[in-house]
Amino acid sequence: MRRNLVLIVAAGVTLVLFLLWSSDAPAADPVGPRFRQAQDHMRAGRFDKAEPILRWILRTNPELVRVQLDHALVLFRLGRDDEAKEIFLSIRRKPDLPFAVRRNVEDFLERIRNREPLQFGFDFGLWRDENVNNASEAETVDIPVFGTTLPFTLNERPQAAWVARTGANLRWRTPVSPQAHLEVRTAASRDTAIGEPDFNRTHVSVSVGPRIRYFLGGAGQRPLFGQVNADLGAQRHWRGGDGYSTVGWLGFGLDQAISPNWRIGAQASYWKTAYDEGPNAQEPTGLSYYAGFSRRIGPGWLTVGGKMSREMAKRENRRWKGREAIVSYGATLWRDLSVSARASIGDREYEGIEVVGKRRSDDTYAADARISHRALAIEGFLPVLNLGWSRTDSSVVLYDRTARTARIGMRRLF
């Protein structure tokens, strides 16, 4: 009896101590299991089920950065870009955010930006042009001589000058089906010949056309991406302060992957030029064809292609045929440094005889490079350095031209 009483008292004391301990112990944290549940949904691609769980967790603990990141990612996957962008921007504004996290946030902001229907960019530059009065834009008149007419070119002299460029471009696109969207592009630029206002050039262009995406490959095979493009556009040119010409064009393009590391591309274009002044004989029509292939090499793509062009006009010395070989390479190194380079060599053969009594033949050479680094981005705007060199060696010295360009473009990341 006495022994039973002792056991009862000991059990009572143990129960009291357990109740006292449990009242002081923290309650079980429900966030951990719920967060793991949300991650399981994300790994399985069930973003619609993960989103309300993450939203509930943030109502309870709004400062959990890891949960904020996952919530923004889920919203991005669900196509709710405005909500995802707001969260990513709020995270990016945190002063103590680790660099790696900030870089990932900026990557997603850039991807959201690329999905926005309206894009814009800026272009600034300065270069030395050894012949701003390039004779391809020379004015001509017809002089009557003994019952016929002879073409005579006015003000056709080489003129060197420094040129400053300011420009802007816009791109707007809207989906028309799950595989296609309509794209509208417009651009304007002003090339100011410093100290030579008669040789200022202004260009405004607009184009519209569909972009149709598709995939090739049967069941069990890796799909190969392809896209078909079409463009209808026009460009207006001014020389000095006067209207000069309008060019209209129609173009088609194809880009097709034939393996994970190989792509092929092709383009065809037709254009017609109308001059504001001068005889209709100078208003040519032209055709060009391009074909090339690309190979993944290292972190980037090497592209090699060739182009054939032809322009026709009533006047013989305005007709020409041209060929061009092009090679380019572009890559992103160490995730932040983007570089690309392009070189070309070509020629043009003209049919007619110039006033100087020679048949015109041009050899053309060009090279350019683009460089940018993400560390130089300022509040979502990335400066891009464009360096270029081009040279034309002509059988008629008046058409010789050398230009070295250095331009800064501003690309909007987010």
Image: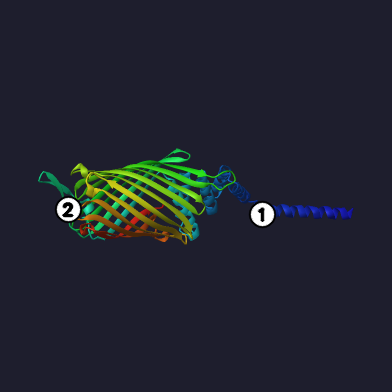
Three-letter code, disc 2: Val
Which element type, helix, strand or loop, lies under badge 2?
A: loop
Residue at image position (42%, 56%) is 304
- In this view, the residue farthest toward the front is 146
Q: Nearer the viewer, residue 122 or 6?
A: 122
Q: Earlier in the sequence, mark 2 or mark 1?
A: 1
Q: Position of residue 154 (x, y in %)?
A: 15, 52
> Of 81 and 291, which appears nearest the observer?
291
Total labels: the figure holds: 2
Q: Is residue 91 visible?
A: no
Other residues around mark 1 within 10 Å, as few (<14) / some (14–19) / many (≥20): few
Where is residue 167? Give x, y as percent: 29, 51
The extreme top residue here reads 176
Q: How is the image coloured?
A: rainbow
Left or right of 230: which side holds 24?
A: right
- 10 Å crowding of disc 2: few (<14), some (14-19), many (20+): few
Q: Which circle marks residue 24 in the picture?
A: 1
The residue that mark 2 highlights is 355
Q: Answer with left or right where residue 269 lies relative to residue 75.
A: left
Q: Is residue 144 above or below residue 376?
A: above
